Amino acid sequence: MRRFPGISAYFRQLSTNSNWKPMPGYSPQQIEKKWQAHWKDHRTFRADNASEKPKYYVLDMFPYPSGAGLHVGHPLGYIASDIVSRYKRLRGFNVLHPMGFDSFGLPAEQYAIQTGQHPALTTEQNIGTYIRQLSSLGFSYDWSREVRTSDPAYYKWTQWIFLKLFNSWYNLDTNKAEPLKTLLAKFAENGSDGIRAAGDEEEHHSFTNGQWKLFSEKQRLQAVHPYRLAYQQDTYVNWCPGLGTVLSNDEVKDGLSERGGFPVERRLMPQWNLRITAYADRLLQGLDTLDWPDAVKEMQRNWIGKSIGAEVEFRIQNPAEESAEDQQPTTNTQQPTIKVYTTRVDTIYGATFLVLAPEHELVAELTTPEQKEHIQDYIDATKRRSERDRMADTKTVSGAFTGSFGINPLSGEPVQIWIADYVLAGYGTGAVMAVPSGDQRDYVFAQHFGLPIIAVTDAQQIEEQADPTKEGRYINSELINGLTYKEATHKLIQHLEANGIGKGKTNFRIRDAIFGRQRYWGEPIPIYYKDGVAYGVAEADLPLVLPEIDEYKPTETGEPPLGRAKDWKYKGLYDYELSTMPGWAGSSWYYLRYMDPHNAERFVGEEAERYWQNVDLYLGGAEHATGHLLYSRFWHLFLKDLGLVTANEPFQKLINQGMILGRSNFVYRINGTNTFVTLGKKDQHETTALHVDVNIVENDVVDLEAFKKWREEYANAEFILEDNGTYVCGVEVEKMSKSKYNVVSPDVLIERYGADALRLYEMFLGPLEQYKPWNTNGMSGVAGFLKKLWRLYHPQDGDFAVTDEAAAPAELKALHKAIRKVEEDIEKFSFNTTVSALMITVNELTALDCHKRAVLEPLVVLLSPYAPHLAEELWVELGHAAGSISQAAYPGFREEYLVEDTVNYPVAINGKVRETLQFPATATAADIEAAVRASDFLVRFADGKEARKFIVVPGRMVNVVV
RNA sequence: GCGGAUAUGGCGAAAUUGGUAGACGUGCCAGAUUUAGGAUCUGGUGCCGCAAGGCGUGUGGGUUCGAGUCCCUCUAUCCGCACCA
């Protein structure tokens, strides 16, 4: 075989051969289709549920299949997870890497309302598009495990878990969820006495075991209901009239629905809830065990919002007492007290008034006749203000005096009782003791309404604003004067508890999760009503299949769409619950179903669950921080309590991939004309910037012919060009969206450069977790890298020509540098530097003109997670079986190849580099010091001064301190 | 207001974790080859300067022989929460 040096082969062929063909080269389009088909036909990436190998579970947050398909931003995380999967397979792990679809959701239903097309149909089509696009990227998913949340075989188990929640209660003594039968046993034995359960204590009625025995079935169920972990209750909800459904807090942004942007209002409605509050503390504790981004953990901590403080009861002063001057608080009277919650009980002597939420139940009772009209006006005004206004307006001070007084339980002083909307009904007790000296809101309120402000520590500076400091010693505080914060808090809580006027108390901000949507396209809640009481559908009757209806709107009477289902009754007798589950129901446990997706007997087989346990690496967007990621943890903890899962947490390591932003291009139309002026000259005219489709722009230069064809109105457009005759666009980075014409489709890029190039480029773009702009220009760089790589294996005429010669030291060094770097970086999930390392290696090997198997075979293995199609192709050309590269041995690096013969040492005086000296790599620090001392280096630069010390950094540099 | 992040060439970025800042890629400049090139190859490219040299990692300070990296200050941008007592 004759060899020509590289490129000239083409031209020789051209000139000597009249019927020349294009130079054969790397053609990803053929290679990629071939290998994708092979992987699919041979089920190359099927994972076994039993193996000698250690398991590794890599999961992407599964997508909602939207109609628009994927743009280049979507696959970013999928590419990273696929690289990890393939890498871990090479490192000897049994890898579970599945994909599925979160296929219930609002867009398909909105589309159905508009067009009458069944959401199942739309969803099915969209999933088809997604699978085609995902497959064309060459992901190593085990497609046999695909799940879809809208599949009855899947949501059967979503409903099953709901019923488990419905049939469980949370025992605070054992600190875990238990089946209701343990509760029923307690009722039968001691009645409701001594039961400590999660939930609203006021809803838990008290009865004796004797009464329990006499209860009817209905009475029993009613008594049990408030203990259930899935329960129905009148709840203030975010009602969205535009969508005709309630939304969870994380589906509401700035008072508008996240989907659709419709206004949202507060409304009291009967709702199904999940008692996530029972798990608040455990959800908080568990965060410490997780390898998650700090931002997400912190968001969850804030969302849970644990605060440690105290509840204090303020007695209400009788009108009669006012004159009687009865200084001895009589605790035996049954008169109502006002319970407040505070995290700063130490400041109680500074509590100079009380503020209740306008919705507080005692407001009516406390309002004196003189104040009645005033208070009613205030309450009405509050109601009129939407939630949104209330949030936006935190500056205005407003409130109203009830006319009544309470008594500060420690100072004994009477304090005015006010209402104000800065106090929230839903948090704590809906009432606060106002300490103007220590809390800025109270301070502003006190100033505005002329209420007293009393300093409580000697360190407080309160002339202009409240001072919440915990420094200093207490003053004006009889019982705790002279004490520090810690001592005072401790002493006060003891005092309160001893006198029955308060107690230490921990509060959480997190609310129970509302679990019903008045919508069609979701899992039916498996509940039916008999005699006005909710019953769970029997397990044997699951799944409760979503019935067909004629229209996807609410009924004329305002019932949810399921009210339209004909003859839809349990056992033909009982009405079903008409709301469906929220979007997050199916996604709260899908990671478990992947472990054993076809199991018809159980939500996940016991053995499969014990083997896979939980997700080792979870990739997805940060937008799910307080929604999906919290709900999943809650469900997992619950399943753990029932002994149904093994691991403590569902997702051990989490990475949030950053968004890829669009790079929008602009053209500048001179106002009132059809003339467009290039960026460089636009300042000479009055112009309007218009988005131009990035697909007809190359390196920010518009293809003017394509531009004229792009839109009819531009067909006769005229242009003022740069002096070099091109039209240059303006650039801005924005979110990718159709309306900005900056969407880049992966399909087009795969067509042109291949999936391998796209995968590499997305990783090369920058750190995975960062937001970064897309720029198609860069694609040619990685495409060039792949061509260069291909040419290492096909140095002439495009023929495969790898030799069996022994590798030279320089070649081995290039290879092993890459092996080490690639391995180090992928363990840190640093994909961009990994790709760079591969590029450098190929550049080096090209420069060395290396075509040797000893180097190129390990290189293919190294490459295979990143550019799997090309790697498979080369692997087979190297003589291996098709599809076997995923079982190849991962090359280990050998230190000895990396050792340098000589090392260049920059020699610096006082940190300033003066000269570079060369030493053998084996030289020790002492050798180098001696050599520098012996050289004329010091003589030349020391200016008569002596070297004070030598700093030799092995392999790096020498610094002489003078 | 509270919390989390980020800041390095025209652009995306790298820096063995305290040791010659700007690797790799793009873009740009020059050259080779080609009828042509959105092809391929070679060289150059942080800024100022003809050069010697000087200056350079958001700002200002500090520690150190030596700081993109550690400490303090301030600023800007992004994200999340927001009257949570």
Image (cartoon, coloured by chain):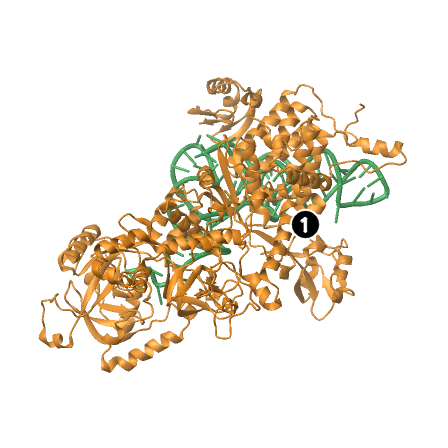
Q: Using the image, determine if residue A778 lies above or below residue A520.
A: above
Q: Using the image, determine if residue A522 lies above or below residue A791.
A: below
Q: Using the image, determine if residue A769 lies above or below residue A86.
A: below
Residue A769 position within the rendered picture, expressed as x and y whole percent measured from the top left: 52, 46
Is residue A346 visible in the rendered image? The answer is no
User: How many residues crowd around disc 1 within 10 Å: few (fewer than 14), some, or many (20 or more)?
Assistant: some
Residue A7 position within the rendered picture, expressed as x and y whole percent measured from the top left: 78, 32
Label 1: which residue?
A747
Furthest residue to the right?
A18
Q: Is residue A748 left or right of residue A179?
A: right
Residue, x 44% and y 64% (percent of image)? A577
Kind of residue indicated by mark 1: Asp
Q: Colour of chain A?
A: orange
Q: Quadrant of residue A90?
A: top right
Q: Nearer the viewer, residue A532 or A334?
A: A532
Residue, x 29% and y 78% (percent of image)? A375
Residue A905 position within the rendered picture, expressed as x and y whole percent measured from the top left: 54, 25
Q: Is residue A823 left or right of residue A41?
A: left
Q: Nearer the viewer, residue A133 or A531?
A: A531
Residue A297 position within the rendered picture, expressed as x and y whole percent measured from the top left: 41, 48
Quadrant containing the C terminus of chain A in the rendered view? top left
Is residue A706 visible in the rendered image? The answer is yes
Q: Which chain is green?
A: B
Quadrant containing the N terminus of chain A in the rendered view? top right
